[in-house]
Image (cartoon, rainbow, N blue to C red):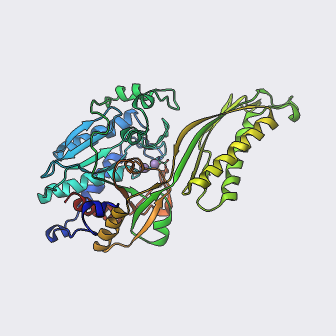
Amino acid sequence: MSCCERHGAAGPVAVDPALAGLRIRPERLLGRLEQLAAIGRTDEGACCRLALTDEDKAGRDLLVSWMRELGLEVRVDRIGNVFGLRRGTEDLSPVMSGSHIDTVRTGGRFDGNLGVIGALEAIETLNDAGVRTRRPLVVGVFTNEEGARFAPDMMGSLVYVGGLPLKEALDTVGIDGKRVGDELARIGYAGDAGLGLYRPHAFVELHIEQGPVLDIEGVRIGAVESLQGISWQEVTITGQSNHAGTTPMRLRHDAGYCAAAIGTKLREIARELGGDQVCTMGLVKLHPNLINVIAARATVTVDIRNTDEATLREAERRFAAFLEELAAAEGVKIETRRLARFEPVQFDDGIAHLVEHHAGRLGLSCRRMTSGAGHDAQMLARICPTAMIFVPSIGGISHNPAEDTRPEDLAAGTDVLLHTLLELAS
Ligand code: HGY
Ligand code: MN
Ligand code: MN
């Protein structure tokens, strides 16, 4: 049953005409985005706020100050998720929006940030207009969405919906050897609110597409109805370090060669399966990582995704079989560690329809689409009707300092969010 039916509405409920003309304030939205983007800015112009670092803390502190300025009741839960509650006229389950503000090391200004600041902007627009919705509104800022420092990604929202035990999350050790629980306490965001603090009536996340579809097609808004499956693993190859000059090729157990072979095989699997299949070897570490030493050990990460679960499993099967052959052929030990595994997700058709409806009402072209990236929305979809709103990424670039979206698209997506939330909370 879609959210609209659950809502008791056959389709979009007519929004009070007086509110139909409500619009966010673009300069305020853009100003906050720039203020947040300045926290963790690197020399190459990237946004680097890895989860639970001092930069993440500084970003969280800024958000909490904005939430308080807007009169929201701020709560922090035990995995560090931050929530700002705006009461409604009735004490009903809230409509939630939000995203994340942690970034990858070479992050852009909008990934995650737009969803959080866009939700705050929608709320401030309602404050300015003196509008009180029937249902409460909640802005959620989820811990460690990126998973770049601590796997899995979407950790905070996964714990929130009960998909990962809190203790397991807190005991997770990151790529720098730090423990989630210790870092959370160190930055002062080990909150006391219980997990699953709010059971939302609905969840809507505004996000940049991070892919090329909307930009190439010249479409303004994406009504995101699904999200592809994600498979993350760490592969450790243990070979034998030896002299690069004296060791004949037939006697080598070269972990460095195996890392390269894995990268090549992943490209081959993607090509063989075609369609939506994507495979990435994002992290490679060699030991001792020296010019004249055959690598004794290699650690690589493998990110395999597909919109179709059966095909994703086939890609995983082919890769596992390849690792067995490689270990035997090179005489090395190969161990794998599962870092994340999420099946493809279908979002709520009714909410996607609301997004289309309000985009249309605002004169914005809109198309249904799937998400190639993982998002907190895929976790909230486990406990409530959920969908996403995309705005175009110029050139489809993301996880890159060049990540960019036109200001008018940032504002347009936030207006669609405002009216979608307004309708769901009315
Ligand atoms: O990996 C992802 O898709 C997201 O950026 N965490
Ligand atoms: Mn994101
Ligand atoms: Mn991201």
Quadrant of the image occupied by residue 232: top right
**Where, quadrant-wise, is the N terminus in this rendering?**
bottom left
What is the x, y in percent for residue 122? 24, 56
Q: 59 or 167: nearer the eye? A: 167
Q: 127 or 354: nearer the eye? A: 354
Q: What residue is shown at x 72% (from left), y 43% (from top)? A: 321
Does residue 21 appear in the picture of this structure? no
Is 192 left or right of 221, judged from the image as shown? left
Location of residue 244 with respect to 281 vertically, above or below: above
Is 30 left or right of 227, judged from the image as shown? left
What is the x, y in percent for residue 214? 45, 67
Is 305 left or right of 50, judged from the image as shown? right
Does residue 282 appear in the picture of this structure? yes
Quadrant of the image occupied by residue 80: top left
**Where, quadrant-wise, is the C terminus in this rendering?**
bottom left
Tally of marks: 0
Quadrant of the image occupied by residue 243: top right
Location of residue 300 with respect to 120 vertically, above or below: above
Q: What residue is shown at x 81% (from left), y 37% (from top)? A: 329
What is the x, y in percent for residue 332? 76, 31
Q: What residue is shown at x 19% (from left), y 58% (from top)? A: 125
What is the x, y in percent for residue 197? 27, 39
Q: 394 or 372: nearer the eye? A: 372
Location of residue 332 with respect to 356 vertically, above or below: above
